[in-house]
Structures are given as structure tokens and as C-alpha cells.
């Protein structure tokens, strides 16, 4: 009972705050995607043709 | 929980920031100058760099410059709040919390240095790390609130990007990139003191000891002229080392003459209105001057690339 009460008194995000959180989440997702692409590109272009030289 | 308690919890737990606020922390306008000068440092360097690695280099330098801007805004939030020019920044306006800006700046600093090191070499990465350290620790934390020479010494941070660009390509630092460093370093005082002369009330209110507040308006006018008298020959010096061609010579000569004209106009301004006008002209004009010098180097580099192609095409047509 007391838990439910403290829940009721907890912080509720307003619609505006929820929208901002969504936009921040989207930006973080894009940044992580960009990082993956960045490290992929650095790996490929630093290794160059040597990328094919590996024991199979 | 009382309303007040809920309010303070909300204040500390809920972020009000939009992604744009974090972009504003990176000082995009300063970043554009960093990107441009670093790019020129890269293209004038002897040697080649893969275009993709070159683009990643520019990105890393830009992010590193932005990170130091975020750390600067974190540390300076108290003085930004009392200055009109900066009161709307993300932290004083309450959109970004100090802790958010600090962690954002620290993360991007480490990230940008690591990426530059992995993509190019560790000399360039070390120079980027030094630039961030110099801007945040030496300038922002050490000099800015203590001495009127703050921007003279602090200008070194803003002058390093072309050296980083050069080091990324060559793995070394020679006299040529140091000339580009010297131009930006010597350009910084007249540029910012022109702004400080018209904004001295703002700086005075914030307790930042800019030269007009400490040494007086008359002395500042003279010092603007003295630094301009040094930066103009420094602007011509790359010609002696074969760094610039005809376009550069024209830009450095005409631009240098304009800089001297604006500096004398500040020195001789008789009333408040004339001084403000002369200062704004120097502030904007000095940006144009620096841009013209570096743009000339970029144009000459592009012309060297295109000239053989053009000659081949014309040869075929003839």
C-alpha cells in the first residue's frame, strides 16, 4: 500500500519532457550508428588492400 | 513528498535538453573556423592522405574543438549567466545541467583524441589533446579570470588546428605549419580586443579582466594597432617559405592593408559612436582577413590539382 503511494508521488514526465527524451534517444541512436560506421571506415581504409591478406 | 521536494527532485533528475542544446555546447561557429583552418593545414602539407581518412581527421579535430567548447561552457556557466552575449547558452538558460555538459565534454575529448590517433598518428592526436588541455585548463580555468593577457596566451589553442592538420598528414611539425599557427595566434588579440572594447560593460559585470577594463580604452586601442603591425608581416611570411602563391600574396597584401586601416581607425576614433563603428569593422573585417588568407591557400591547392586535368582536356580539344 505504502509502495503504491510512493509510486503515485513519483515524478511523472510531462508530454513535453517525454518528447524531449525521445529526441535525445534518437540522437544517441544516430550517434552510436555513426560510431559503428566510423570505426568500420577507419579499419577498412587503414588496412587497405592488406584486408584481403589473411590465412583462411 | 512536498511540492517543493518534488520540484527539486524533478530539477535534479529530469533533463530538459534537446539534442540541439548539446550541439550548441560544441560552439558550432568556433568549430567552423577550426575545421576550415585544420583542412587548410592538411591540404598544404606535403604528402597524401586517403580522402576518407582525411574526412575522419577533420571530424575528429572538429569534435575535439567542440568538446573543449563544452568544457569551457561548463566551467564558465557562472560568468556566462551575467553576460548578455552568453546568457542564452544552454547551461545558464537551464536547458542543460552542468554535470551533463561536463560528462559530454570529457567523453568527446577522449573520443576525438583516440579516433585521431587511430586514424592518423599519435603526434596529431597528442597535439589535439594538448589543444583541448590548453583551452580548458590553461585558458578557461587559469588565465581568463586572472589576467588581461588571457586571450593573448589563450589564442594558442585556437591557432593549433592547422598544425594538427599538417601533423595528421606528415607525422611531423615543421616551420610552415608554425607560420600558420603564428598568424592565428597574433590575429587573436586585435580581433577579440575590438569586441572587448564595445562589450567592456559586459565583461566588467562578469569580472573578466579584459584589456579595456584593466588597462583602459586608450591603451587597448594602441595595443590593437601594435598587434596588427605584427600580424600583417606574419601574414606575408608564408610567401618566403613557398607556402603561398600569387593568390595568397594578393590576399595577404590587400587584407593586411585593410587590417592596418581598421586598426588606425580604432586608434583615431574621436567619439563613442565612431569607436564602436571602427571596432565592429575590425571585428568582422579580421574574420574576413583570416578567412581570405586560408581560403587563398585552399584555392591555390585546388588549382594545382585541377591545372593538369584542365591542360589534358584542352590538349585533347586542340
Image (spheres, rainbow, N blue to C red):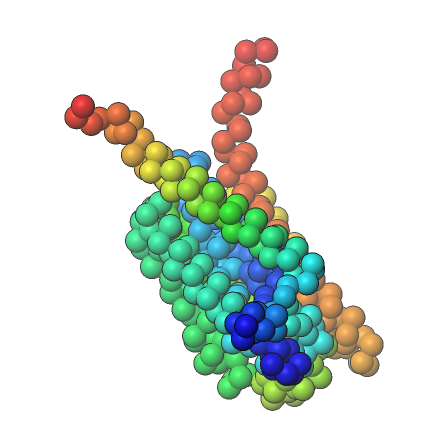
Residue nearer the viewer, B271 or B127: B127
Q: Is residue B5 left or right of residue B158?
A: right
Q: Position of residue B271 (x, y in %)?
A: 81, 81
Residue nearer the viewer, B294 or B213: B213
Residue name at image x 47 percent, y 43 percent: A33
Q: Position of residue B179 (x, y in %)?
A: 45, 58
Residue name at image x 45 percent, y 53 percent: B61
Residue nearer the viewer, B242 or B41: B41
* Residue A43 shows in the view: yes
Q: Is residue B52 left or right of residue A50?
A: right
Residue name at image x 69 percent, y 59 percent: A15
Q: Position of residue B23 (x, y in %)?
A: 59, 57
Q: What is the number of callouts on the image?
A: 0
Quadrant location of residue A40?
top left
Q: Position of residue B214 (x, y in %)?
A: 60, 88
Q: Is residue B103 above or below residue B236?
A: below
Q: Is residue B302 left or right of residue B176?
A: right
Q: Which residue in the rendered view is the most extreme toward the left?
A: A55
Residue nearer the viewer, A33 or A5: A5
Residue name at image x 38 percent, y 50 percent: B115
Amino acid at each position: 500500500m505504502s509502495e503504491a503511494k510512493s509510486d503515485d508521488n513519483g515524478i511523472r514526465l510531462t508530454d513535453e519532457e517525454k518528447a524531449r527524451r525521445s529526441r535525445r534517444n534518437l540522437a544517441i541512436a544516430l550517434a552510436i550508428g555513426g560510431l559503428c560506421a566510423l570505426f568500420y571506415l577507419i579499419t577498412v581504409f587503414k588496412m587497405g588492400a592488406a584486408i584481403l591478406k589473411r590465412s583462411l | 513528498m512536498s511540492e517543493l521536494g518534488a520540484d527539486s527532485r524533478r530539477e535534479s533528475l529530469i533533463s530538459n535538453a534537446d539534442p540541439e542544446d548539446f550541439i550548441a555546447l560544441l560552439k558550432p561557429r568556433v568549430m567552423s573556423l577550426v575545421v576550415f583552418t585544420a583542412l587548410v593545414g592538411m591540404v598544404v602539407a606535403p604528402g597524401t592522405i586517403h580522402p576518407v581518412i582525411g574526412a575522419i581527421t577533420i571530424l575528429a579535430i572538429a569534435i575535439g574543438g567542440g568538446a573543449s567548447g563544452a568544457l569551457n561552457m561548463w566551467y564558465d556557466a557562472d560568468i556566462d549567466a551575467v553576460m548578455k552575449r552568453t546568457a542564452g547558452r544552454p547551461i545558464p538558460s537551464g536547458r542543460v545541467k552542468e554535470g551533463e555538459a561536463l560528462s559530454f565534454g570529457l567523453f568527446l575529448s577522449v573520443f576525438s583524441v583516440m579516433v585521431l590517433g587511430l586514424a592518423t598518428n599519435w603526434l596529431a592526436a597528442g597535439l589535439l589533446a594538448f589543444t583541448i588541455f590548453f583551452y580548458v585548463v590553461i585558458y578557461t580555468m587559469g588565465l581568463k579570470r586572472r589576467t588581461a593577457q588571457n586571450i593573448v596566451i589563450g589564442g594558442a589553442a585556437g591557432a593549433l588546428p592547422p598544425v594538427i592538420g599538417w601533423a595528421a598528414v606528415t607525422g611531423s611539425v615543421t616551420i610552415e605549419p608554425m607560420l600558420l599557427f603564428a598568424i592565428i595566434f597574433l590575429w587573436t588579440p586585435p580581433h577579440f580586443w575590438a569586441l572587448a572594447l564595445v562589450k567592456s560593460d559586459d565583461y566588467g559585470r562578469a569580472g573578466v579582466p579584459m584589456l579595456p577594463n584593466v588597462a583602459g580604452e586608450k591603451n587597448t586601442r594602441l595595443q590593437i594597432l601594435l598587434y596588427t603591425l605584427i600580424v600583417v608581416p606574419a601574414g606575408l611570411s608564408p610567401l618566403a617559405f613557398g607556402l603561398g602563391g600569387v593568390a595568397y600574396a594578393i590576399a595577404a597584401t590587400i587584407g593586411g592593408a585593410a587590417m592596418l586601416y581598421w586598426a588606425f581607425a580604432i586608434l583615431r576614433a574621436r567619439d563613442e559612436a565612431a569607436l564602436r563603428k571602427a571596432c565592429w569593422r575590425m571585428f568582422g573585417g579580421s574574420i574576413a582577413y583570416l578567412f581570405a588568407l586560408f581560403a587563398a591557400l585552399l584555392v591555390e591547392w585546388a588549382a594545382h590539382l585541377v591545372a593538369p586535368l584542365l591542360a589534358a582536356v584542352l590538349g585533347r580539344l586542340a
